[in-house]
Amino acid sequence: MPEIIPGDKKFETIPSIKDKTLRINLNEHIYGTFAEIGAGQETVRNFFRVGGASGTIAKTMSAYDKDFSDAIYGEEPDGRYVTESRLKKMLSHEVRLIEERISREKHPNKLFFAYANTVATIDFAKQYKGHGWVGIKFQTKPNEEYSEIHMHIRFKETEAVLQQQTLGILGVNLIYGAYYKHDQPKKLLRYLYDHIDKDKLEIDTINFTGPIFENVDNRLMSLQLIKNGMTEAVIFGPDGNNILPARILYKKNVLALRGSFRPVTKVNMDMYQRSHEMFLNENRVDPKKALVIFEITLSNLRAEGEIDEQDFMDRARLLCSLGQTVMISNFQEYYKLVEYFSNYTKNRMGLTMGVNNLVDIFDEKYYRHLSGGILEAFGKLFFKDLKVYLYPMLDPETGELINGENVKVHPRMKELYKFFKYNGKLADIKDYDPTILDIFSREVLRKIETGEPGWEELLPEGVANLIKEKELFNYKPSTKEVSS
């Protein structure tokens, strides 16, 4: 029984698209279907061109007419065609057909696959650049359960023919990666851009499922998308799977909390709960469309030097255990975060932050790269339908409570601060828990790492048990725990 063995030394250097397609075509075991909707049959074209395609291609099709497409794959409840749901239906349908029509008795060593994409390229007016879903459902051993890779892409090129060519190359890279790099998913992800410049294509969502990816955490794969410059932000849900940003943010009232969450503490959750209550009571907020995002920036993950992926996973696991939706972004400045949300919603948004974060916002050094400086940044930040909710802090030296009324910003920024404060853009969180203001994540982390007792009660219910059970954040048992 054959098994695909990744990593031939012969192919250590980046092979050309021709070499990739030829290697697949000459593999007598790989056999499957290509179903491409919306941008031509660009992927399968590459396999036909190099020769030997009869050993790889069982069928190729493109159901452009919507009625034909619905007759084959079924209607979508929302009537749309460029969706992940459509992609999954295409893959499942084509795999079922090949299993039904190709006899396992005659072909016991075949490794079946279905490759599919459903894509909308740039329109004639060049206002809508286009996007799509691309995926593969495949085997690496005969008769094994199928594994799948699904991704969402956004085109950046301004000509339909260029987008089609890019899609064709991406499809080849995906199929090749699935068969020859599946045991190295991080490399597989990077190799998707072989012979594609990052300014041509954005991959903003990817999910790996199935038996050969059972040890792959899609939250970690989300982080790779950011680290590799494939996208600027990713979102994943409490179940750990990536969520398409456009789907979850579209026309929503978004409340975002930025933090290190290292680990998430009672203060973080109090900030969330109190600001969420205020947000839902705003005039232009529909509670049915309200969404809370816990955001961690890449710059925060790099705060200790190189990104520690295990440390990231520890933070993500805790937030997901609390049922939260998590966003990882490359937006160091808040105005970039708000601009990103504005791509998907024009409804009221909110930012929850501590007073110390507000002081940073009014620091001019963060805006020297902008021609308009801090005024340009504030124009992008506050002249959208946005409200900031301020959580107070205790001055570590004096013990004084600092909030939006007595916070000290740079003298040059005082009038600017007053303008936004007294025009209703800033609101103090007043119904807070005063007994927890002295909790700081860095102190909790130090106690976890050194085994100092007492940190458990500083965290939300259930979080301490998870840290101990999974040994997160270099957890060290206290002397009391060891002796008991």
Image: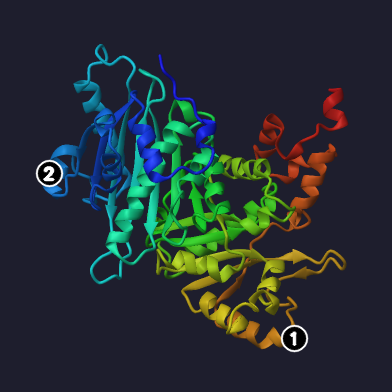
Q: Amino acid at mark 1?
A: Pro
Q: Is residue 483 left or right of residue 73?
A: right
Where is residue 55, by image quadrant?
Answer: top left
Crowding at dot 1, Cα within 10 Å, few <14 / some 14-19 / many 20+, comes out as few
Give the total of numbered labels.
2
Q: Quadrant of residue 12?
A: top right
> Can residue 407 be seen?
yes
Q: Tell me the residue at 54%/64% (across/down).
A: 278
Q: Position of residue 464 (x, y in %)?
A: 70, 37
Q: Which residue is mark 2?
A: 68
Type of the residue with mark 2: Phe
Q: How is the image coloured?
A: rainbow
Q: Position of residue 458 (x, y in %)?
A: 74, 46
State the image coordinates of residue 265 (x, y, percent, origin top left): 69, 49
Instruction: Using residue 349 as the reference point, say whether residue 399 is left or right of it.
Output: right
Of the two numbered discs 2 and 1 on the same chain, state the one appearing first in sequence: 2
Look at mark 1 in the image and give the residue it sits on: 411
Most distant residue in the top direction: 105
